[in-house]
Image: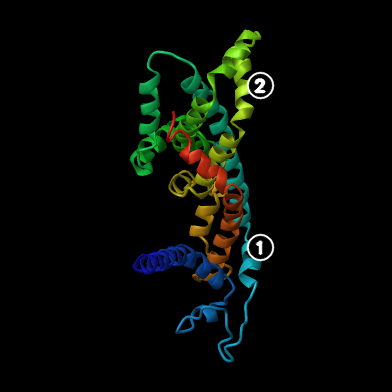
Amino acid sequence: MTKRITHIIGRIFFWFLVLLVAFYMLFPFYWAINSSFKTENQLQMTPATFLPRDQTTLEFAPTFQNYIAVFRNERFQHGLINSTIVAVSTTLLSLLIGSFAAFALGKLRFRGRTPSLYIILSMTMFPQVAVLTGLYAVIRVLGISAIPSMILSYLLFTLPFTAWVLTAFFQGLPDEIMQSAQVDGATPLQTFWLILLPLTAPALVTTGLLAFINAWNEYLFALTFTTIEVDARTVPVAIALFTGEISHQEPFGEIMAAAVVVTIPLLILVLIFQKRIMAGLTAGAVKG
């Protein structure tokens, strides 16, 4: 009987913690959605309401004006286009270069292979602000425009991660596959491109999605490199510098609406591919 009571208390405590963590993580997103459907007057109501309500009658009264204003904002539209270009380009380059590197590190034997793996891992440990000043100076000297400079800069952080994760997947593939291909006369490049790479499709989806999210949400480099080229600003910078339709206005509702618009596609992608993300992050944890 005592065991049963202890088990029940343990389960109740467990689910209490689960609900507490879920509330802690989801409430900011809920509050952003709630604020995005409020007018400026509703946002100034005290105490704050958990639903958009009319100031007088307190009836449920959401508004879509913030979303309309966001989609009418040309800077936000340009930011969406720029972010798509930068994020997609960064993802494709990371997968292309990272898959070649992962194949070499995971399946080929050469001197310095293990140190190379640790060097790649160490590159992910540098904070962005530590390399920002020097990288910005190099970009200015070379005269590279804002969008290409952001793509090259993001590769510094997405490419090592991509190569490291894909290496674990290539190491997990049986060596007999490569040996059989060699017996049939295939070159290492043909073996990689025609046989091994299709088998790592789940890993490519995982690392590609994570690289895309990282490039889509990056703010520090985007803000620095677009200081002069205003038209090249990405979505995070456009939202941070949102001015609204009225001069000297703090458009909190429009900022929340823009944040929701930008976040929802990423949230959908994560929910769809969450199993593959976990598989990618845990690959090689037991064997590698």
* Mark 1–mark 2 distance (CA, rounded to whole Å): 46 Å
Label 1: element kind: helix
Residue 94 at x, y percent in the picture: 53, 33
Labels 1 & 2 near each other (Cβ < 8 A): no
Q: Which residue is mark 1?
A: 72
Q: Which mark is residue 37?
A: none
Q: Position of residue 224 (x, y in %)?
A: 44, 46
Front-lying residue, 123 or 256: 123
In screen coordinates, is 204 left or right of 227?
right
The residue shown at (52%, 22%) is 103
- Image coordinates of residue 21 in percent, x first then y, are 43, 63
Given the current orientation, which residue lies at the most extreme bottom position? 57
The three-letter code of the residue at mark 1 reads Arg
Q: Quadrant of residue 189?
A: top right
Q: Which mark is drawn over residue 194? A: 2
Q: Quadrant of residue 92?
A: top right
Which of the marked residues, 1 or 2, is nearer the chain's N terminus? 1
Q: Amino acid at mark 2?
A: Leu
Q: Secondary structure at mark 2?
A: helix
| Residue 182 x/y as whole percent | 60, 10
Q: Residues within 10 Å of mark 1 (few under 14, many from 20)?
A: few
- Note whether residue 3 is visible: yes
Q: Residue furthest front?
A: 1
Q: Is residue 232 above or below residue 283?
A: below
Q: What residue is rendered at 35% in x and 22% in y?
A: 115
Residue density around tag 2, few if under 14, some if 14–19, many if 20 or more, within 10 Å: few
Q: Is residue 247 visible?
A: no
